[in-house]
Image: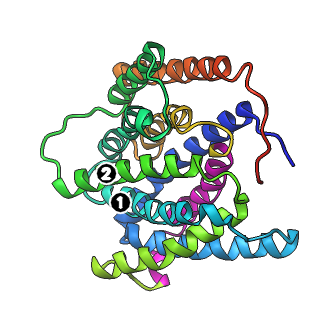
Amino acid sequence: MPQSTPANGLLFALVSASLYGMNIVYARMASFAGASGSAIVVYRVFLMLVLVGIVVAVTRSSLKAARDERGTLLLLGISTTFVSVCYLSSVAYIPVTVAAVVFYTFPILIVLASPFVEGTKLTRALLGVVALASLGVVLVVGPAFGDLDWRGLALAFGASIATATQFFAAARCRKTGVMAKIFWIHVLVLPTAALIGWAAGELAPPSVLLAAPFAVAVTIGGYVLGFLLQFLALGRITAVAAGIVYCTEPVVAAISSALILEETLSPLQIAGGTLVLAAIVANVLLEQRRLKDAPLVPIAD
């Protein structure tokens, strides 16, 4: 079996976060054309299941879930649904940058909850890294918060809580193979997302995706690859380490929104991006120090 490699886990998390950062910008573009977040989630989950089925058939991978992880997979499916639906729907009501700063309270939630969930000791160094990353995120995505729709804020914060839950659950789900995880999670996500979309009156036929084909394609493609890399990362590093690395996402979102949606980046935002990158480097060094003498453990891929 392959060995757990924290360095690879950090790299997977970094690339995944970057893909998610671009994903939300194109989701906003799609919402302008009438493709709701709920509709995109339903159809991209369907595509994910098709792709997983093809990969499993070609590689003859097992879809068997570890018996003692089935409850965790259920929690992963529910939390993943709310992350996707809430975050993608939030940008229909508030700008990408505002949604991102609210959503990115989840690394703080992870660190603060980690002593109770993972028994992690909150060191001064770790709290300092979180504070640095959080300050950077606020500077990057901190526009004026006047005249904002409360629905967008509530959806973004709901996505934050769901993401913290997802990270803790994924870090505890190490026996089940990656393909099996992705398959069973999305089997749970599909009906849940469809029910939410139907209840919200946003469940449209597939033709709605043609309203903004390129934006929808990037949103779906970025999610598929980003999700795969996320779960490869969370099988190798802790939820706390991953949460801090994922602070890259709003930086990428801010840069992408400036380039694609023609929003401008101020010197203050550039300084914030630098702080986030500094926090990521510090986190990598702390994680390497923590795992320096730890033995490698086998994981399921």
Amino acid at pointer 1: Cys
Q: Quadrant of the C terminus?
A: bottom right
- Residue, x 36% and y 72% (percent of image)? 34
Can you say whether 199 is above or below 2 in the image? below
Please tell me which of labels 2 and 1 falls first in the chain: 1
Q: Position of residue 298 (x, y in %)?
A: 80, 44
**Magenta span:** 206-233
- Say the numbered circle drawn on residue 40: none
Q: Is residue 31 left or right of residue 3?
A: left
Can you say whether 182 is above or below 239 in the image? below
Q: Position of residue 200 (x, y in %)?
A: 27, 76
Q: Is residue 50 left or right of residue 200?
A: right
Q: Quadrant of residue 142?
A: top left
Q: Is residue 35 visible?
A: no
Which residue lies under the disc numbered 2? 156
Q: Is residue 135 visible?
A: yes
